[in-house]
Image: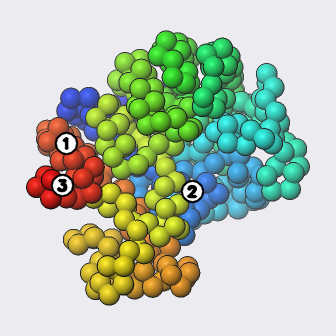
């Protein structure tokens, strides 16, 4: 395990909000940070050059999906994940632990790992803590995630405690395998415990005893109401080391990210920006906006006035609506570019607010506007 100073530099705090620098083999990542999701070595509909243009600092890949297809042999022959997808920046890879939750119908959990039936061809294969680390090292991940068991929601306390202990046992094996392989890749542990504060504390105490380069909050955004997600973060935050990066996994509506930054979190990922784009929804500071609304049919303006993304600088609302109605692929691509730009720019603004010491006023104004849908207090009345 690297020293805290070798992994993360905390530049400034404003309340609980933090601005820092995560240090990886492929470059520094300024935090707080939103990480676009490239599950299968591709951020859906967006090229690596476009991600560079919008200054995406780090992206995600998924171990389970990449093991299934195209397979580690192919990626190895292509020179590793970075060369395979032509991305020179940092990559964080999920271990496949989330698929223990999301693919519950086609997997069987054992003490030493999980047997999956491939969602592609039904072929059975095994993924455990050692295999997950070996796979991520082969991929060339900058930040590896420990293999965990993500329990469903709702879930009884006994089941939560059982998965927590299994996750801790697997986390220890992940750390041992990392040491055995002699790799310098960063490794983050994942805390579990569901909606039980004492289990969340127990999980983090166990992970800290093992020792990791960073710490993630898992088992959120698995179907529970938003207040449950925030309660899990509140229960975990006091037990997270201040000198290590903090990652909330799979949770990232714009207002949620701003609230979580205010709770002391550093790293976020979410498939939402490209997923809702495929449904014709644009992300804005005034909340989500359907591009199908009748007022856009003859509107020559951009999705958002003053937005500096590729889409808003070049195309009208009318044209984007036409593309979506005509089911042209360019439409979902243009909205995806806008949505990702909006996410990344929102987090950059949040970082600036922390560094300038105005986090409270900035975050309050953002959340109020988002909640009102861009309306003023007078308009809301």
Residue 200 vertical placement versus 319 (above, below): above
- Element type at marker 3? helix
Q: Position of residue 316 (x, y in %)?
A: 33, 83
Left/right of residue 319 with respect to residue 62 in the rendered view: left
- Element type at marker 1? helix
Q: Position of residue 6 (x, y in %)?
A: 41, 32
Disc assigned to residue 38: 2
Q: Residue at x 27, y 49 (%)?
A: 371
Residue 74 vertical placement versus 154 (above, below): below
Left/right of residue 231 with respect to residue 108 in the rendered view: left
Q: CA distance from mark 3 to mark 1?
A: 17 Å
Residue 321 vertical placement versus 211 (above, below): below
Q: Position of residue 360 (x, y in %)?
A: 17, 38
| First of labels 1, 2 by sequence position | 2
Q: Nearer the viewer, residue 381 or 17?
A: 381
Determine whether label 1 and label 2 are within 8 Å by CB.
no
Q: Residue at x 25, y 46 (%)?
A: 367
**Residue at numbered disc 1:** 364
**Residue at numbered disc 3:** 380
Q: Nearer the viewer, residue 379 or 344?
A: 379
Q: CA distance from mark 1 to mark 2?
A: 31 Å
Q: Nearer the viewer, residue 190 or 119?
A: 119
Q: Position of residue 380 (x, y in %)?
A: 18, 55
């Amino acid at each position: 395990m690297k020293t805290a100073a070798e992994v993360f530099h905390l530049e400034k705090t404003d309340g609980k909000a933090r601005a820092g620098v995560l240090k990886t083999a492929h470059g520094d990542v300024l935090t707080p940070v939103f990480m676009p999701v490239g599950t299968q070595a591709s951020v859906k509909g967006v090229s690596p050059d476009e991600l560079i243009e919008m200054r995406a600092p780090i992206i995600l890949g998924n171990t389970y999906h990449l093991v299934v297809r195209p397979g580690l042999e192919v990626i190895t022959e292509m020179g590793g994940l970075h060369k395979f997808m032509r991305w020179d920046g940092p990559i964080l890879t999920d271990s496949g632990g989330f698929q223990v939750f999301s693919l519950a119908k086609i997997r069987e959990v054992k003490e030493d790992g999980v047997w999956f039936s491939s969602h592609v061809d039904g072929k059975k294969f095994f993924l455990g803590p050692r295999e997950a680390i070996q796979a991520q090292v082969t991929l060339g991940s900058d930040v590896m995630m420990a293999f965990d068991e993500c329990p469903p929601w709702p879930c009884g306390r006994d089941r939560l405690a059982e998965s927590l202990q299994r996750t801790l046992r697997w986390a220890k094996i992940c750390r041992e395998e990392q040491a055995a392989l002699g790799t310098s890749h960063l490794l983050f542990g994942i805390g579990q415990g569901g909606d039980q504060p004492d289990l969340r504390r127990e999980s983090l105490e166990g992970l800290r005893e093992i020792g990791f380069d960073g710490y993630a909050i898992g088992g959120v955004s698995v179907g529970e109401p938003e207040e449950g997600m925030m309660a899990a973060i509140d229960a975990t935050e006091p037990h997270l080391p201040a000198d290590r990066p903090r990652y909330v996994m799979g949770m990232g509506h714009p207002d949620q990210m701003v609230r979580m930054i205010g709770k002391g979190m550093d790293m976020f990922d979410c498939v939402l920006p490209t997923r809702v784009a495929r449904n014709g929804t644009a992300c804005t500071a005034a909340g989500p906006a359907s591009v199908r609304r009748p007022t856009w049919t003859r509107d020559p303006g951009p999705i958002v006035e003053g937005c500096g993304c590729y889409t808003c600088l070049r195309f009208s609302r009318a044209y984007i609506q036409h593309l979506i109605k005509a089911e042209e692929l360019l439409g979902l691509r243009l909205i995806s570019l806008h949505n990702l730009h909006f996410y990344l720019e929102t987090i950059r603004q949040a970082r600036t607010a922390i560094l300038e010491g105005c986090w409270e006023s900035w975050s309050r104004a953002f959340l109020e506007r988002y909640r009102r849908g861009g309306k003023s207090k007078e308009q809301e009345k």
